[in-house]
Amino acid sequence: MNFIFFNALQAILPVALTLHPDPNNESAPSKNTFPAADLYNFDLLADYGRENQNTLQFVPGFYNEWFAIAHYNMDTVIVGPFLLSPLEGRPITKSFNHLLSKEDAKRLKHELLALPLLSLEGLSEMLILINFCMTEKLSNLLPSQIKKYSDLIQWEHIQQTLDSFDHPRCNQTQQFYQFEINLVRYLQGKTDVLTEGTPCPNKRPVKSLKRHQNYTTFLLELMNRVALAEGVSAKKSYALRTNTLKANAASKSPEESVKIRFQAAKDYRDLIEELAPDHSDCLVDHITNYIHSHLTDSLKVSEIARHFYISESQLRKRFRDEMGLSVSEYIGQEKIKCAKKLLTQATSLSLKDIAKQLGYFDQSHFSRSFRSATGLSPSEYKRSKVTF
């Protein structure tokens, strides 16, 4: 069995052409450019959906990353890892290697979080062209959320697209990613301008209203998540989402769908602005709730900031202004509170178990943090509570 591994974020399309395997060559070339690729069980990944030949499927990885797995006769193409924008926060349903050490898991997660987001448009173009490279056909076997683009690709556009990959992220992919970033900034009040020339899912003449409606739907998911993160009530946010989805589904032209997405952006911004002056307070409340529900993780400020669509510097400032201590100090404080409860209530747990449960690097790290906060080692604290 032959494997071809592409990094979706490093101009892989020209690589895909050069690595097109010879069916008579059992030792097909491979490309492995993701630093933590050695931590993945690619045999297990490649077995996913093997019974469905000539198909292309999305497969979740460890955290928020995704792979695209394609089977072409005896060849398996693994595209990834990549993060999707605006759907990069979808819950993960399975992972493919349960044997990672804690250190390896941290290294993998660190490298995954460093990946830039890939826009939906960039991903669709990439997968269509990889499919073309492997089959020499603009196949209809692509999944429904991608297939809608393949019917519009012309042969001359293949070479034009390949020629544009002179940078790890092509201009078109960057355009959509930047628009999504600008949309988030607009909702948060960081900019008052949302460019009227919204990129629809392609620069080519649009023949399908469905493509515009789909992109509007994706953007609505993003706007809904931003509004919830900013403190808008779930009832209001989802009501606006539902009403806008209905209007979008009933739209009769691409222009109408574009108009609907802009109106939705304005409506969501109005909901967020209604929260003032308590906006900051609501955000900090959401952050503290998030921290409490993730105390067993190795929480990082960068991860929290990305979850709430806010810069690290803004997060640190808002949090300190409201709480009187830094985010890291608050996380450490809450972990120690939880550790105290575990030490006194769950006597069957070892220090190693408690350290692992609270997301510390190891038992020594836990002990140092505990002594620094309380003046006692975990064992001394536990004995003192038993004594009294």
Image (spheres, rainbow, N blue to C red):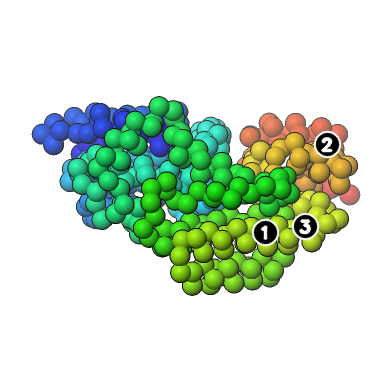
Closer to the observer: label 2 or label 1? 1
Foreground tag (1 vs 3): 1
Q: Earlier in the sequence, mark 3 or mark 2?
A: 3
Query: Residue 273 — which label?
Result: 3
Q: Secondary structure at mark 2?
A: helix
Q: Residue at x 36, y 58 (%)?
A: 207
Contact? badges 1 and 3 (CB < 8 Å): no
Residue at mark 1 = 266
Amino acid type, label 2: Ala
Place residue 234 in its image quadrant.
bottom right
Q: Secondary structure at mark 1?
A: helix
Instruction: State the residue at coordinates (38%, 48%).
Output: 204
Residue at numbered disc 2: 373
- Which of marks 1 and 2 precedes in the sequence? 1
Instruction: Kindly state the secondary structure of the residue where label 3 is placed.
Output: helix
Please state which amino acid type lies under the numbered disc 3. Glu
Looking at the image, tell me whether mark 1 or mark 3 is earlier in sequence order.
1
Q: Position of residue 55 (x, y in %)?
A: 26, 53
The Cα–Cα distance between marks 3 and 2, rounded to whole angstroms, is 39 Å
Q: Position of residue 160 (x, y in %)?
A: 33, 35
Task: Kindly tell me whether residue 333 is visible in this rendering.
Answer: no
Q: Which is closer to the viewer, label 3 or label 2?
A: 3
Query: Mark 3–mark 2 contact, CB under 8 Å?
Result: no
